[in-house]
């Protein structure tokens, strides 16, 4: 099957596991259309795992701004550092080694193995769930991933898993647009809370303001118009290691 049959995405133009790893972190809970320009800018600035590992977290967060869930950027940065120190800069091709990296669970690890190394592994994510719910669990009201994985394993294309998963992802995206294969059937599904008015919104605003440079808590609070979520959001960012306080100034973690 030709590559032209699939949706054009920059991370599909290569099997470089670093590129795939970056895309998998970015695509978690973020739409493809938003990820594409961010991915291109990120790869231009950090073209390989060594460039990313040697950068500061602050530099990474600047490029990440707009994608949300900034802890993903922190985990990706930490994963790059560990790949350099523990794996000589080579992204592992063994699942157990991949899941040893920060922020990488079994599904992300398996996605890297399938897309980069064409390994016939099983994984599930939102679009894949949509396909299998539509065709195999149409009458079910709740499905766990264990049952789903069994069907994925039984139907997996063992010779071309990379192309198979591309097709599943594109088909799942189509089904969701049609209102089919509803992921709410999944016992693992958690509806994302609205961004507007959420703590995530304030955390993102603080990160964006700090990408402009160090500032004091008073100035930062004023810029956010003393939002009553500010104190909690700032405390969470400091706890998560994304923001630091020193000599009366707040700054992104170096």
Image: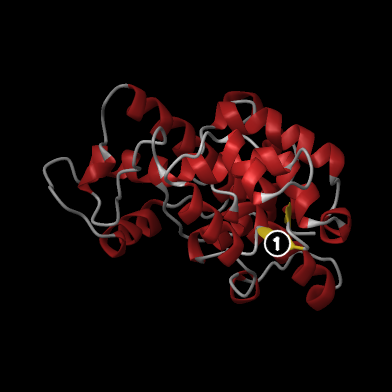
5 is higher (above) or lower (below) than 129: above
- For disc 1, the neighbor class at 10 Å (few under 14, some 14 to 19, many from 20) is some
Quadrant of res 178: top left
How is the structure coloured here? secondary structure
Front-lying residue, 90 or 120: 90
Q: Which residue is mark 1?
A: 245
Residue drawn where x is 46% and y is 39% of the image: 227
Left/right placement of residue 231 relative to residue 71 reads left
Instruction: Identify the element where label 1 is drawn.
Output: strand
Front-lying residue, 24 or 75: 75
Quadrant of res 95: bottom right
Left/right placement of residue 228 relative to residue 3 reads left
Q: Find residue 37 and report its horizontal and vertical position in percent.
A: 69, 28
Front-lying residue, 235 or 179: 235
Q: Find residue 230 and report its horizontal and vertical position in percent.
A: 49, 47
Residue 234 appears in view: yes
134 is higher (above) or lower (below) than 16: above
Tally of marks: 1
Q: Find residue 220 and report its horizontal and vertical position in percent.
A: 63, 42
Residue 29 appears in view: no
Q: Quadrant of the C terminus?
A: bottom right
Q: Quadrant of the N terminus?
A: top right
Residue drawn where x is 55% and y is 50% of the image: 161
Left/right placement of residue 56 relative to residue 194 reads right
Residue drawn where x is 71% and y is 37% of the image: 39
Residue drawn where x is 47% and y is 45% of the image: 200
Q: Find residue 46 and report its horizontal and vertical position in percent.
A: 84, 46
Left/right placement of residue 50 relative to residue 101 reads right
């Amino acid at each position: 099957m030709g590559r032209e049959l699939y949706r054009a995405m920059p991370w599909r133009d290569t099997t470089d596991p670093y590129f795939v790893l970056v895309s998998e972190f970015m695509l978690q809970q973020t739409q493809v259309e938003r990820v594409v320009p961010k991915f291109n800018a990120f790869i231009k600035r950090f073209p390989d795992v060594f460039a990313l590992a040697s950068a500061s977290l602050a530099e990474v967060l600047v490029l990440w701004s707009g994608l949300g869930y900034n802890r993903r950027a922190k985990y990706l940065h930490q994963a790059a550092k560990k790949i350099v120190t523990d794996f000589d800069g080579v992204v592992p091709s063994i699942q157990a080694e991949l899941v040893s990296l920060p922020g990488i669970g079994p599904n992300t690890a398996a996605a890297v193995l399938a897309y980069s190394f064409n390994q016939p592994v099983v994984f599930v994510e939102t679009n894949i769930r949509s396909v299998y719910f539509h065709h195999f669990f149409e009458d079910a009201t709740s499905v766990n991933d264990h049952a789903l994985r069994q069907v994925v394993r039984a139907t997996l294309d063992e010779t071309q898993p990379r192309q198979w998963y591309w097709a599943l992802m594109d088909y799942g995206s189509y089904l969701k647009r049609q209102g089919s294969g509803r992921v709410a059937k999944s016992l693992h599904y958690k509806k994302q809370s609205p961004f507007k008015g959420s703590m995530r919104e304030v955390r993102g605003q603080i990160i964006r303001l700090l990408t402009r440079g160090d500032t004091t808590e008073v100035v930062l609070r004023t810029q956010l118009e003393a939002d009553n979520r500010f104190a909690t959001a700032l405390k969470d960012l400091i706890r998560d290691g994304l923001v630091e306080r020193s000599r009366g100034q707040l700054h992104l973690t170096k």
